[in-house]
Every structure is written in C-alpha cells, then in structure tokens.
Amino acid sequence: MKKETLRVLLFALSALFAIVLLDQLVITNLKNSQVNIINVALIFFFCVSGMYLLLGLGGVLSLCSVTMLGLGAFVCGFLNTKLNVPIPAAMLLGALASGVLALFLGLLLLKLEGPCFVFGTIGVTYIGQSVFQNFAAFTGGPNGTGGIGKLVLFGYTFKTFKDWFPLLAVFVLLLILLLHRIKQTTFGRSLMAVRDDATAAYCMGVNVYRTKVVVFVLAGVLAGFGGSLYAVHNGTISASLFTFNTQLKFVIMLMLGGVMSPIGALFGTVLVNYLPELARFANSYLNLLYGCLIVLLMIFMPMGLAGILKEAVVRYRVQRNKQLPGDGGKGGPSDVVS
Amino acid sequence: MKKRFLAVSVSLMLALGLTGCGQGAKDSGQGGNDSTQATTDQAQTEAAGSQEQTEKAELNGAPLKIVYCGTSLSQENGDRAKQVLEIAAKECNAAGGVNGGEVVIELIDGGNDQQAYIDAVLKALEVEGVSAVIGTFYSQYALACADYVNEAQIPVFNVATNFEMANASDYYFTNRCVDTAFSNTMAQIAIDNGVKNPVTLFYNTSNGYNDSAFMKAYMEDKGFSVAEEIAFDNTTTTDYTSIVMQAMNVADSDGILLHATANTDGQSIIALLHQYGYAHPIISNSNLFSDSFVKNVGVDACAGMIGFAEYTTTQENEANKAFQELMFNNSSFSYDTVSWIDASFYDDFSLIVEAARLAGGNDKDSILDGLTKIKGYDGIMTSYSYHEDHSYADYIYLAVVQEDGTIEVSDAVEVTH
Amino acid sequence: MALFFQQTLTGVSVGLVYATVAMGLMLLLRAAGVMNFAQGNLLAMGAYLSFLFMEKLQLSSGLLMVILALAVFVAVGCVFCSVCFLPFKHAKWPQAMMICTIGAGTVIQECCLLFITAETRSVRPILAGSLSVGGFVIPYQYFFIFGAMLFMMTGLFFLFEKMYCGRVMSAAAQNKYAADLLGIPTNLTTMVTFCIVVCMVGFSGWLLAPVYRVSASLSNFQARAFASVVIGGFGSLKGAIIGGILVGLIEAYSTYFTTTYKDVVVFGCLLLVLAFCPQGIIPSGTKKEKA
C-alpha cells in the first residue's frame, strides 16, 4: 500500500509542477480565445468524469449529464444575481442542487434496464432544454442569466481566462486523483463488478441498485460543480449551452479519449474542443469531417486513445517477456485480454 | 497493426474522395453547387487577388480587415455571407480599395450553438489587425458576448434587431430596424386594416417576446387589445398544425400578428393558415417578404399577406437591380434568389467601408468614429443614418403580397427611434 | 368541441408519422440491438432525395425516380450496416455502436446539406389539394402517407409472421449464436433488415417532404420516435404504432395549456410511463436473454 501512496504522491507533485510550468511558459503566450477553449474543456471534464464513473466503471450510459451541468449553472447564477448569495456558496449550492436532482432521477430510473434507462435520460435532457429556455423566472428565459459575479478566493479575483487556468487545472488534478482513488475502494470494485455481471455481483452481496444510485448522485454532483464553474467563468449563461447535441459531444469526448481511463477522458475532451481550431482548413466541410472522424475512430479504436496506448504497452511487455529464456510455453497476457 | 493503419488510411482517402467527388460531379451539373462554388470562388479570389496586386501596386496601405464569425459556414446563412462578402470585397478592391488599403475578408466558422459562437467571437476579436466584425443573427448569443466585445472595443455588426444589444454594449451596431420601432409599425398596420383584437404568434426568443410585448402595449395604447400571445419553439418543432389551430381558434380574435423566420416555421405556418382557410388578415414581419419565400410556400398561400419589408425586392429600384445584377453575374454566387439576408450583409460591408472613408483611417478606432458620422447613406435595403440606439435603418416599407405572387412595396415609412 | 375534434385528428395524423419512424427504430433495435441515432437524419435524407430528383435533376418518369431511390436506399443501407454494425459484433462496448450511428447521422446530414441544398425548400405533393372533413382539412398527401404506412405494416407483418425468410430474420435477431449454429447467414439477414429499415424511413421522408418541407429540422422527429418506442412498449411493432399515436395525441392536446413547454409534457409522460409501467402500454412477449 505504501508504494501505491508514494506513487500517487509523486504523480500529484509532478503534475502540479507541470501545471505551473505550463502556465508560465505556454498559457501566458497563448491568445485569450485559445485559453478560453482550454478552460471550457477543463470545465467540461467535470461532466465527462461523471460519465466516466457511470459508463467506464459502472457500465451505465446516462445521457442527461448536460442537464445536471445546466442546473448547477443556473442555480449558481440565480442565487448570485437574484438572491445575492456570495459566489463560493452559490457554487456549492449549485452542485448540491444537481445532486438532489440526480438522487431523484436515479431512484426513479435506475430500476430499469439498458435501453429504457437511456431513453429516460434522453427525455430528461429534452425536458431540461425546454425548461431552461422558457422558465424565465428562474433562468431568465431565452436571454439567460447575465452579470454573474467573479470568483474571489483568498483575496485573489479571477478576472481573465488566464487567471482561471491554474485554478481549473488544479481542480482537474484533484478530480483525477479522486477518480483514481474511487477505483481502489470497495465501492469502486463493487461498481466494476456490477458493470461486468450484475447477477454475479448480486450473488456476492453487492446491492446493485444502491451502488448505481450512489454513483449516479456522485456524477450529478460533479456535473453540478462543473456547471457552477461554467457559470462563473462565462459570466453569462443561457439555455442554448445545454442542449442534447452538447450531450452527444460529451459522449464522444469520453469514448474518444478512452472510456476506461480518466486521463484519457481528459485528453479526449481537450481534443474534441480543439478540433475546430485544428481543422480550420476544412471550412464548410468541418462537420462532415467531424462525423467521418467519429465513425472511423469508433470502428478502429473503440477503447479510445488510452486503449490504444494500453494495448501498445501490453504488447511491448509481451514481447519483452517472450525474449526471456524459459518462458517459451507461457502465453502472454494479451491472449487473455481481448 | 499494419492492417489497421491500412484500413484507416483507406477510409480517410474514401472520405476525402467522397467530398472531392461531390465537387467534381457537380461541376457538370446544373445550377452550380455550394461546394464547387467554394473552390472556384476561392480560386477566383486568389486569381483576382494576385491580379489586383499586379494592377494596383499602390494598394499597400493598412488593410481594412473585416471578420465574419456568424453562423456555421455550412448553413445557408453562413454560406451566403461568405459569398456576398467576398464578392463585395473584390468589387471594392477593384474600384481602388479604401484609404489606400485593400479590403480583406476573414471567415471564422461560428458553429451551431452558443459556446461555439463565443469561441468564434473571441477568435475574431483577436485577429491581427481586425477593423470590424460581422456577427450573429441571434441576439441571445450576442448578449452573451457583450463583455468580451466591450473589452476589445471593436465595432461589431449583428444581423439582429433586438434593442437590448445596444444596451449591453456600446460597440454593437445593426443596419436593421430595431424591434421597438417595427413592432409599432406592425401594430399600426393591423389597426389600419381593421384588426381590433389580434393574436400574436412568435418564436420564443427574447426578440419574439419583446416584439409581442411592444405590439400589445401599442394596441392597448390606441384603445384596442391583443387576444392572446402564443409563443412557439422553432428549434424543436416540426409540425405546427396544433399550434396554428390554437391560434386560429382564439375567441373573438380577428387577425394574426406573426413573427417567424423564413425557414420551416414561417413556411409551415403560412401554408397551414391557407390550408385551413383563415379569413382574417395576417400581418407578418419582414423575414417573410422575399421572393424565395413566396416561391417555396406557393402564391395562393401568400396572397394577401401584409406587413413590412426591409428590402424592396420587387420595386423598380436602381440600387436593387444593380445589386441583383452584381450577384447573378458573378459565378461565385450559387443561389438563384437574392434575399434580404444578402442585402443585409452587403450593406453591413458598405457601412463599414463608408465609416472608414469618412474617418480617413482603416483601423478600428477610426471606424468607430466614422460610424457616428454616417448620415443619409444610400444602401441596398434602405438609406442609413446613425441613430442613438445604434441602428441605422432610416426607412422600412409597407408590403402586400399580391394575387400574382409579386410583393407590392409602398413608399417608405420613416423609422421612429 | 370542434377544436377538440380537430386537435384529435391532428394528433392522430402526426402520431402515425411518429409511428413510422418508431417502427424502423424498433426493427433495428430488435434485429441488431443498436439504438439508431441516425433515424431522423435518414428521414431527412429521404426528403432531400425527393427534392434532388424532382426539382434539381427534374426527372420526369415516376418509375425511374422510384427505382433510383430504391437503389440509393439499398446502397445507403448496406454501407450503414457495414459501417455501424458489422465491426461491432465482438466489441466489448455496445455504446461504441451507438456513437458510430451518431457519427453516421452527422455525415448523412452534412452530405445532404452540402451536396443537395442548404436552404429550406418545398416540393410538389403527389396530388395537390385537400379534403375537408367537418372543419378539419386533410391534404391528399396524408392519404398517401397513411397508405404507405399501412402497406409497410402489412408487409412487415407478413414478412415476419408468415414467410420463411422473415422467421429466419427473427431468429437471427433473437439469438445470433443459435442462429449461426442452425446455419442461418446472420450477416446477410442483418444487412437485409438494415436495407428494409432504410427504405422504409427513406420513403417516409420522401412522402413527408411536401408536408413538412425539405430541411434538416425533419430530424426532430427522432426524439418523438424514441418516446413512442418507450411509451408503446418495447419489442413489438404494435407497441411502436400505438405509442406513436399516443405521443401525437399528447402533443396535440398539450397546446391547450402551453405551446412552449410541449417537450416537457411529452417527455414528462415518458418518465411517468417509465416510472409506473416500464414495459409500456403493450408489453411484448419476448424476454431479454442473458447469453
């Protein structure tokens, strides 16, 4: 165990160092619009990490994370602009509100199997879209909520996008450590058991329903917190930010980066957000290229980029093992993992 | 691994080949196609550009850079904007440029949702040497970006009519007539046609809600009333039958004040009203008064529609005729009708160029200065002068669709600000 | 009272349109286990094809148009199947297949927008004019749509219940492993199912184009189709049809008290159905196998 903690600590310290380095050398030289894309990608990662928990660890596909994101954002905005609640408290309350909604929906929907559950979450997303666009008293209607205050932490005001980057990067680092830690706990293992075979997990004493609800609420809270960050970062939010198409984009971000790896998911998120930049030459063919890319990547890399990397590492290890003397008869691990 | 790479590269080549194939096939097809026109247009502007450089070597002053970052370039509006702006720039440069420099158009894909538009605006505001930006149709996207525009202090022309944009930012301009003014005109048209208790039917953006509120206030001010305000969501609705039936059956109503776009919603609503034999006057906003709209919906359905237009398509107007000729004679324009959207982009372009001329400089501050000086400038849609609410249109026109499908446009009605 | 009657008829007619899309969705779900997110885009593709043949290319012969359209639909069905289904037969993640259909849907839509037309256009109906029934007006085009629907329903019924090849396809859909053991060419049957579905949806789009206009907003029908599939009951074609009609009626009646919250009403009903009777209104006989 101690070696594991040491490894994690080392990883965290080196990541922190990398963040500081990145910030000083790269971010200060980038244009404001590019930093904005990176920041928004980091904020979306909160939502995508919730989906990672649900899909990668739990085997549950939920298509309503964007509604949790929106609810967190609008609650934070509403509390701050209409009720003058200070920003840190409003952000936490936003996350809490999403958690409550996730609890309610989870209790309602998680009894259903596969496709029914997915359709249910699709319904929730459409309801959310409609309510956000039309419920003027809460969300400000079509114009949305504007004039949300700036975040002030320990006397430091986060005004520009470049100010936000280190904070968001640290949050994302903590989130990745949290996700890694969840995998090691009993809860994480029960979750993976439920994903692999719910009946077997039930026989082993895992309360399948309760596990799923807990992870759904956790994903909801994470998405809600991401929503609050989104609201404060953008300053103005409106319903057209939280549509079903955005949800589909989140799913693509997760699958692209690697559904089984949080770091892969982060990479996938940044890549999908940066795609319009990279593909500017495509002009009016951008969407067509985007669709083709998704199809090709799903066919050839269903486990995402992280999956490809892992496969390459495994194959390298097998090669190395094969070269050791006296191991001629042993089959490599790649025969088991397929 | 090798097989995989082979498969991926073959598929990529297929995909690229498909797009190239589409272009090649349509080269011989009739009427031309956006994709072909994009490549030939690019080739043309490049050829024209190099020609300009050899012919007018003295166009080496600071360029006037206009960036377009509105809707996605593969949608109709974005595609039209691209074609119109590039034709306008070519024409202007051929005539000697502005203040000794040439006009350069840069295009940024504005995407299909709000976050993509915010990203596009931020990029546009940071383009090196940008002088002015042409933005979005959706006022709610524009409002979300107001802070960034205020910080960058670059003039932005939005093709939207919401009066709230000017409140949000001093750098937002529009060449159109804002809704405070035209809602009153629409209500007055209703009253002049004997409508005393109409139903307002509008799309559920802040624009629509504002218009309905203003029309209601005006009617009540004049001693009449509005029977009901019915909003619809034009992004998620495809079938408008039930909504139209509700609107038609409001008790004691004697007319419909319609605020819709010329896409599925406007076309469906007008067609349905005709199908059900709606006998009362239909007063519409300017989006629906265009030749392509009448062609798509059918002359029978549109005949008798009244309202106001911002672009006098069918009037014997020299400026209109010249504009239509300019567009149709240019092979890089791939559409077979010219609409107010094209005229609007062209006029935005002309206003920016005129402002630069009046101020004598091509940078953003001169343009900001010059924009306040514009007075009585004759554009394609109407004449333009600077007003306090940052809108420019001087006149709109009362319009009636005749029995034969032509749109009869009356004398100008002065826009009250 | 007259308004109620009109709204009912509106609901039923729109509902039958939803039912057509839902039938195709249900077929694919049963045959391939894939939730097809490209259904709406395929519907729009049918409409765009009708515009291409009738207005842009100005083909005069109706028979030629139908044959060409059939050829295009079968081609698209085969490509769709080989791209979105065959590579995923042994995949660990069923979600990968779903996302592939999302990508395919985007590609189909963008191809239509880029190569056919980006504007919202209209096409001539097969027979112009309409029939007036007690204050309610039905365009003659709707009768063609209903007729096509009835034809599709009876065709599918005969195919799956009476004909041998239909039973073979059902077997392949229910349990691939067993079907393989029996010597049934599962790849071929799945491809045939895909082609049938694409033809169904494509021709529906073709017939709908005069009524709802040729534009990308036809893909909005997909969400309602999902709702119909769930409300009507999983796994049965009858369920899809009843569900579609119910969704149409709910939407029509919802305009009595709200025009902007229509989505909330329809999907709220969906959630209620899921909460209280997850099998839907018409529960199907097939149980889900755990292989």
Image (cartoon, helix red, strand yellow):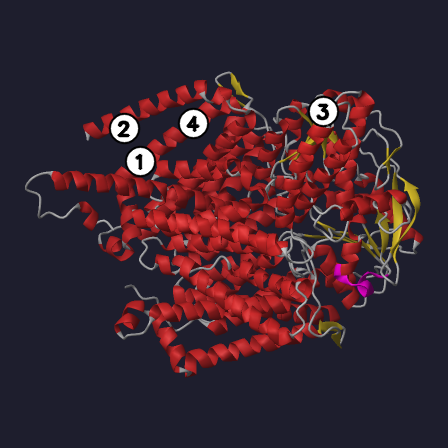
Evaluate if marks 2 and 3 touch, with contact meaning CB atoms under 8 Å apart: no
**Which amino acid is tagged 4?**
Ala
In this view, the residue in front, A307 or B320, is B320
Q: How many marks?
A: 4
Q: CA distance from mark 4 to mark 2?
A: 17 Å
Q: Chain of mark 3?
A: B
Query: Along the horizontal axis of the image, is A23 left or right of A190?
Result: right
Q: Mark number for residue A169? A: 4
SS at circle 4: helix
Q: Residue furthest front?
A: B54
Rendered position, A245 above or below B384: below
Q: Earlier in the sequence, mark 1 or mark 4?
A: 4
Give the CA separation, mark 2 to mark 3.
64 Å
Q: Closest to the observer: C60 or A123?
A: C60
Q: Is residue C175 left or right of residue A163?
A: left
Q: Pinpoint the chain carrying mark 1.
A: A
Question: For numbered disc 1, what is the local secondary structure?
Answer: helix
From the top left corner, tell me how far across and down residue B400 is, in percent. 88, 55
Amino acid marked by disc 2: Val
Q: Which mark is residue A180?
A: 1
Q: Quadrant of residue B72?
A: top right
Residue B40: % across, % down: 64, 45
Q: Amino acid at mark 1?
A: His
Quickly name the residue at label 3: B57
Residue at which label 2 appears: A8
Residue contact at pointers 2 and 1, CB within 8 angstroms: yes
